Image (cartoon, rainbow, N blue to C red):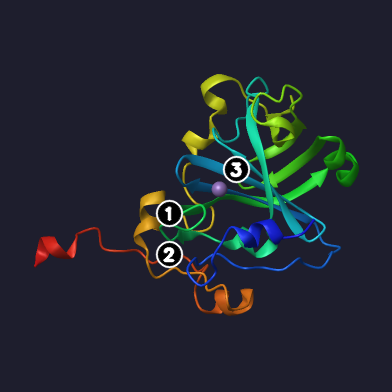
């Protein structure tokens, strides 16, 4: 697992996304993050930390608590761990141009050996997020309908956290950022929140890239001129 593909697709002189490096293996709990990404099409980037990078899948419809909702999850390139902190705007004409929100985050607990499961195409794990809880599955789709071995399915295991029908639609019930409480429009409008890829994570945090959003006046300056 490495970040070559991730880096090839991006021009770090232009995009505020982190260039990143493969992190050290740590003994603490593994993190996960889900980023809502308004690119050409809206999708949810589902990312699980493993071996110093974030394994990543793009889920067009986002997660559902209904075990009957098997969500298409397109496997994409590994991302650096720092990417999990990124909420902001990827500039126009750059790879993935658009607004990125930290929609959920927390830790994940593999229910079976994660490396073996990842290689075999079946990950079963418990999520301890702010929005997502309980046991979930990511299974490589056999049909190949959506592009060979890149298509996986994300779905909820039946447990105490599972819900059915409209009650399961967490993406509609909780559309906001878990990092700042902002919606997509507010993130898009906050030009002061920029991730500098040539600085370390600590410097970015110190510089305010992931600070809580200030409350902004809702009246446009043009209107009060
Ligand atoms: Mn994306």
Classify residue 208 as left or right of residue 22. Answer: left
Q: Which mark is residue 131?
A: 3
Classify residue 38 as left or right of residue 34. Answer: left
Say which element carries label 3.
Answer: loop
**Neighbourhood count class around disc 3 (C-alpha, 10 Å): few under 14, some 14–19, many 20 upward:** some
Does the rendering let one see residue 111? no
Q: Earlier in the sequence, mark 1 or mark 2?
A: 1
Can you identify the residue that label 1 sits on? 182
Indicate the quadrant where residue 160 lies. Answer: top right
Say which element carries label 1.
Answer: loop
Can you identify the residue that label 2 sits on? 213
Residue 52: x %, y % from top left: 78, 61
| Image quadrant in which the N terminus is located | bottom right
Mark 1 vs 2: CB contact within 8 A:
yes
Looking at the image, residue 96 lies above or below residue 61: below
Looking at the image, residue 186 lies above or below residue 46: below
Mark 1–mark 2 distance (CA, rounded to whole Å): 8 Å
**Neighbourhood count class around disc 2 (C-alpha, 10 Å): few under 14, some 14–19, many 20 upward:** some
Residue 105: x %, y % from top left: 63, 51
């Amino acid at each position: 697992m490495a970040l070559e593909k991730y880096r090839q697709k991006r021009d770090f002189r232009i995009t505020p996304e982190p260039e990143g490096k493969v992190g050290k293996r740590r003994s603490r709990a593994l993190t996960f993050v889900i980023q809502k990404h308004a690119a050409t099409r809206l999708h949810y980037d589902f990312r699980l930390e493993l071996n110093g990078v974030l394994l990543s899948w793009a889920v067009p419809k986002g997660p559902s608590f209904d075990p009957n909702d098997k969500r298409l999850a397109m496997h994409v390139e590994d991302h650096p761990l720092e990417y999990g902190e990124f909420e902001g705007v990827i500039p126009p004409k750059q790879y993935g141009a658009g607004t990125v929100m930290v929609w959920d985050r927390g830790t994940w607990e593999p229910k079976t050996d994660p490396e073996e499961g990842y290689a075999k195409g079946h990950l079963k794990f418990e999520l301890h997020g702010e929005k997502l809880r309980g046991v979930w599955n990511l299974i490589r789709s056999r049909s190949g309908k959506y592009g060979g071995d890149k298509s996986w399915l994300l779905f909820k295991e039946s447990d105490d956290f599972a819900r059915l029908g409209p009650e399961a639609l967490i993406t509609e019930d909780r559309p906001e950022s878990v990092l700042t409480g902002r919606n997509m429009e507010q993130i898009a409008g906050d030009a002061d929140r920029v991730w500098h890829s040539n600085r370390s994570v600590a410097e970015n945090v110190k510089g305010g890239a992931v600070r809580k959003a200030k409350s902004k006046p809702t009246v446009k300056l043009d209107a009060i001129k």
